[in-house]
Image: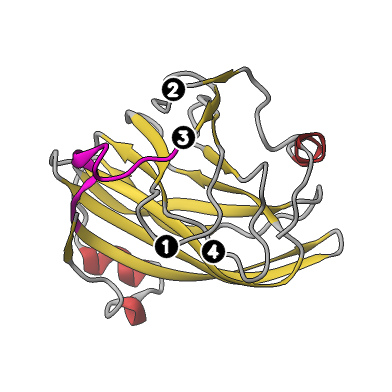
């Protein structure tokens, strides 16, 4: 895990991450950067609920002298307020280099509240959520002070939404600390206007073998 300057991180963002003025809110209302203070169930009880999906995705990323592999934990929660929330966690990172951003797409048309959970395992957290507000439903979680490197694991970071249904139509990718190091896109969960039978999107995405990973449990 290396500490990089914000200047170096801004160079990575060229052409990929929207430059804008920072605000202190975590409700993503307009395009911009939002500082993430971290939160917990004690501070926000509505974040508790039932885990609907818990899927593990392997990733690899290389370029500009960096080469990393690891896993992403994709989680969907039916929160205590009846809506569905979406969480991700970077784990099992190995190789050479550091990750500086996690970008998720597919959240257009919903109210979004971003932050990370302090009440969980991890040693690195995102400091900023960058909302594009351009109709793509894209949000970048930026690890722009302490990046995610080998032997690191992030805390859960999340998007609290007003959606009541979800499917596997979202996508995420990752960016390295050096410009030009970008992963391929990977499937993830995102809000859906209507419920889709689980068997349909699992089959269509080649994830039938992951049925055993999906589980339900009560969380605080």
Q: In this view, does 108 lie above or below 88?
A: above
C-alpha span from label 2 to label 1: 24 Å
In this image, 220 relative to 13: left or right?
left
Circle nearer the N terminus (1, 3): 3
Q: Report the front residue among 63 and 187.
A: 63
Q: Is residue 107 visible?
A: no
Q: Residues within 10 Å of mark 2 (few under 14, many from 20)?
A: some
Magenta residues, as a range?
A: 37-50
Q: CB atoms at circles 1 and 3 under 8 Å apart?
A: no
Residue 153 badge: 4
Residue 36, percent from left and from top: 48, 34
**Residue position for label 2:** 25
In this image, 5 relative to 162: left or right?
right
Q: CB atoms at circles 1 and 4 under 8 Å apart?
A: yes
Circle nearer the N terminus (3, 4): 3
Residue drawn at 41 percent across, 36 percent down: 114
Question: The residue tagged with tag 3: helix, strand or loop?
Answer: loop
Question: The residue tagged with tag 2: helix, strand or loop?
Answer: loop
Circle nearer the N terminus (4, 2): 2
Q: CB atoms at circles 3 and 4 under 8 Å apart?
A: no
**Residue position for label 1:** 121
Residue drawn at 76 percent across, 40 percent down: 9
C-alpha span from label 1 to label 4: 8 Å
Residue 37 badge: 3
C-alpha span from label 2 to label 3: 9 Å
Q: Report the front residue among 51 and 165.
A: 51
Q: CB atoms at circles 2 and 1 under 8 Å apart?
A: no
Give the farthest residue toward the right. Answer: 65
Q: In this view, does 62 lie above or below 164?
A: below
Q: In this view, does 119 lie above or below 45?
A: below
């Amino acid at each position: 895990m290396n500490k990089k300057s914000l200047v170096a991180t801004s160079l990575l963002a060229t052409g990929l991450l929207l430059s804008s003025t920072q605000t202190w809110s975590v409700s993503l209302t307009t395009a911009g950067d939002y500082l993430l203070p971290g939160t917990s169930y004690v501070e926000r009880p509505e974040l508790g609920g039932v885990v609907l999906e818990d899927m593990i995705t392997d990733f690899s990323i290389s370029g500009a002298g960096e080469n990393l592999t690891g896993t992403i934990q994709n989680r969907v929660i039916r929160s205590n307020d009846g809506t569905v929330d979406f969480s991700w966690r970077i784990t099992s990172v190995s190789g050479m280099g550091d990750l500086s951003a996690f970008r998720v797409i597919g959240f257009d048309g919903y109210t979004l509240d971003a932050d990370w959970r302090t009440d969980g395992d991890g040693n690195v957290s995102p400091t900023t959520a960058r909302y594009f507000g351009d109709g793509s439903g894209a949000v970048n979680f930026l690890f722009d002070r302490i990046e995610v490197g080998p032997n690191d694991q992030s805390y859960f970071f999340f998007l609290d939404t007003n959606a009541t249904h979800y499917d596997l139509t979202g996508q995420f990718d990752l960016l390295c600390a050096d410009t030009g190091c970008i992963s391929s896109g990977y499937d993830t969960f995102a809000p859906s206007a209507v419920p889709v039978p689980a068997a349909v999107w699992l089959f269509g995405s080649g994830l039938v073998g992951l049925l055993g990973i999906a589980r339900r449990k009560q969380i605080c």
